[in-house]
Image (cartoon, rainbow, N blue to C red):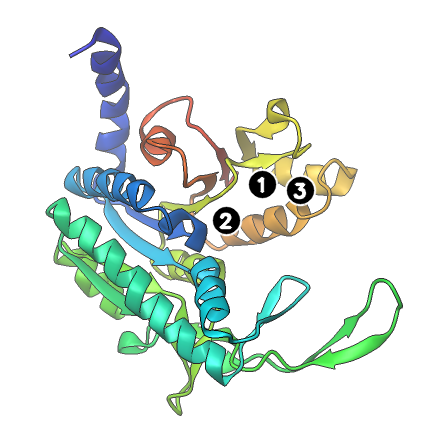
Amino acid sequence: MKIENIDLLRESLPYIQRFKGKTFVVKFSGKVTEDRENLASLAEELALMHQVGIRVCVVHGGGKQLTELAKKLGVVQTVIEGRRVTDDDTLDLAKMIFRGKINTEILAELRRRGIEAVGLSGVDGGVVKAVRRPPREIIDKETGTASTVDYGHVGDIADVDVRLIDLLLENGYMPVISSLGADDDGKIYNINADTIAAEIAVCLSAEKLILLSDVNGIYLNENDEATKLSRVTTTDARHLIDSGRATGGMIPKLENLIALLGRGVRSAHIISGNKRNALLSEVFTNEGTGTMIVAE
């Protein structure tokens, strides 16, 4: 073994000791899971975290694969201001893709690494209680015209019950949860995976919420690698917003994470899901790889 690898193991030891028995919620985007080699690499990283005693709960979306399947089958998709309208046909595809294809492929890769993973959706065990998102008024930015949009079978979270997740974690299983929920009448809804992951992290009193995406953190200037924020506190994040240094899509990301940390999650991380060993580096090294936001 090379000296630098031995040094890396030494550096990781205190983190392994610190996080043993703690709960991490790790959220995948659909883009992260579409490449088989990348998914296999992530499964290895999750397996290592599990083997050193970290309680890992995975939450995943699948919007990219849903869009691709809809295109193949000729199901027209409507996206308004980045939000997908989920009609009857799209909901059927979401059930196939989220709870079926993607969930099963993640489980298979974890099984190859000897991990006893259990596939769920928010419907299973009443984990995610949802309500139908009400119609919303949208303003056309070009014309200024207002219109009302019905998002169909898109849900908002009314409640989260983590008893089933806790039961699995306590018995050494790794829950893998897809982004569907249901109401008390059994109506199924498509729900944003980031939102589900955040609510589950709060209810589990998670040590970390780790968001794996196609970007390697939060940047003050998205075109300049040197402006990436490595570690910020919630006070720092609020100052970035109030001072105007945070712009565009960074503002809602920071606001959501500030609110999350105010509800008991100790730290939140945004890292690349397409960079090998990014997850292990973020958790077990001093330098990390993406952006970590911590409570005061």
Is the C-beta separation of discs 2 and 1 under 8 Å? Answer: yes
Q: In this picture, is 11 found above or below 118? A: above
**Image quadrant containing the N terminus:** top left
Numbered tag placed on residue 238 in the rendering: 3
Is the C-beta separation of discs 3 and 1 under 8 Å? Answer: yes
- Secondary structure, mark 3, is helix
**Number of disc labels:** 3
x and y, in percent, of residue 79 in the image:
63, 68
The residue lying at 83 percent from left, 63 percent from top is 141
| Amino acid under disc 3 | Arg
Q: CA distance from mark 2 to mark 3?
A: 12 Å
Query: Which sits in the foreground, 31 or 252?
Result: 31
- First in sequence: mark 2 vs mark 3: 3
- Report if residue 128 is visible in the image: no
x and y, in percent, of residue 209 in the image:
41, 48
Quickly name the residue at label 2: 261
Numbered tag placed on residue 234 in the rendering: 1
Q: In this picture, is 24 found above or below 281? A: below
Residue 168 placement, left or right of 70: left
Neighbours of disc 3 within 10 Å: few (<14), some (14-19), many (20+): some
Query: Which sits in the foreground, 214 or 171?
Result: 214
Residue 75 placement, left or right of 180: right
List the single residue furthest toward the top: 3
- First in sequence: mark 2 vs mark 1: 1
- Secondary structure, mark 2, is helix
- Secondary structure, mark 1, is helix
Choose top left, top right, bottom left or bottom right for residue 287.
top left
Query: Which sits in the foreground, 238 or 210?
Result: 210
